[in-house]
Amino acid sequence: MKKTKKVVLAYSGGLDTSVILRWLIEKYDCEVIAFVADLGQGEELAPVRAKAKKTGASKVYVEDVKDEFVRDFIFPALMANAVYEGSYLLGTSIARPLIAKKQIDVVRKEKAEAVSHGATGKGNDQVRFELTYYALMPGIEVIVPWREWEFTSRTDLVNYARKHGIPTPVTAKKPYSSDRNLMHISFEGGILEDPWAEPPADMFVLTRSPEKAPGRPVYVEVDFVKGVPTAVDGKRMGPAKLLAHLNKIGGTHGIGRVDLVENRYVGMKSHGVYETPGGTILHVAHRAVESITLDREVMHLRDSLIPKFAELIYYGYWYSPEMDLLKSMVGKTQENVTGTARLKLYRGNCSVVGRKSPVSLYRTDFATFEKETVFNQADATGFIKINALRLKIRSMLKSGKG
């Protein structure tokens, strides 16, 4: 049996991956290289690097992928209006294929034999990571401690960490896990395992409570070019900076909180709480610009694909032929989605109050209820009668007059 000499671990500095780092060294007697993706966690990553080295990592890669994350992953999902089960904007799901892709890059650079991650055997992340690994490097060895080791709970991990002098972020005051990036922050586990329990007020990080948000609304204008956000209030910004700016504005006004019981890919339901302030603003703004720039049938056809697009992200099939096809189709629908949306943010509400575009399909001279000369209302009679014909025949048959 071939000995594993080098493993590239997706490392966050949290409880699970810190224990995994030490466990891999002890169990496999191998060199562990930690990879940390800077996705906009909002924390100083120097301590994470130091912690990885102290825990036993031979090397630590910390890569700033914020712009790539927003440009190549978040924005394509935004262009598709991808929402899972009605309210989840996929902030965690969309990050996993990028982390896994970067891990494979390190594997190639370091000539490693294996990759590892901290996802449990109950969750979705294990699938997202591993489908990406195999799609990008079919022969890679994947080591998944949660499916191998003797530990059965996070309490076991805490005890192991203490035994090895590894600091643990999970405490009695924070009995849940969280995952943060530029798109959102998620919370699950611990006290949130009861779907009837309201999340504690002090849990939230990115958003103020709507009750404590400013008593005056703020107006925000977002510009799009071919479906891609390019500026806020007339100021052009790069992808990561634009989303970070909207996170701050949206968070101040309590935008983007979601409390959701969702269906995991592995078959169980789970209760999650999410904060997605900037992503929520962009989603609403994008829809507003589409409303005046997309042809009706193109919009309806694209909208019919939203559940599938979101499902593929949630399940982990970012690097799949079906996703390649859908992204290509969505990209085609966005060629005319250029314009500006004006939004009103007020105590948790994000409302569209204006939209304009140089290529708008909205025509006041056709839509007006005032006097006009371009639309002959009498034409509607034949239109309605033809479309009603099958309904009339069905009614006649049911009433026995056929």
Image (spheres, rainbow, N blue to C red):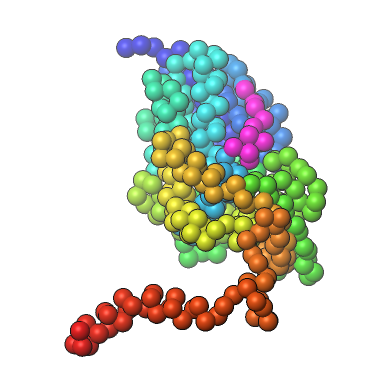
Q: How many labels were placed on the picture?
A: 0
Percent position (x, y) of residue 174? 59, 49
In the rendered image, the quadrant that contains the C terminus is bottom left
In the rendered image, the quadrant that contains the N terminus is top left
- Which residue appears at 80% of the width and 48% of the height? 235
Relative to residue 253, is residue 110 depicted above or below? above
- Which residue appears at 62% of the width and 21% of the height? 60
Left or right of residue 401, residue 228 in this image: right
Observer-nearest of 217 and 235: 235
- Which residue appears at 59% of the width and 75% of the height? 375
**Quadrant position of residue 363:** bottom right
**Quadrant position of residue 252:** bottom right
Percent position (x, y) of residue 198? 55, 64
**Quadrant position of residue 210:** bottom right
Observer-nearest of 373 and 16: 373
Q: Is residue 209 visible?
A: no
**Residue 275 inside the magenta-drawn segment:** no
Left or right of residue 195, residue 63 in this image: right
Left or right of residue 45, residue 399 in this image: left
- Which residue appears at 52% of the width and 37% of the height? 96
Percent position (x, y) of residue 67? 67, 36
Q: In this picture, which residue range is highlighted in magenta?
A: 61-72
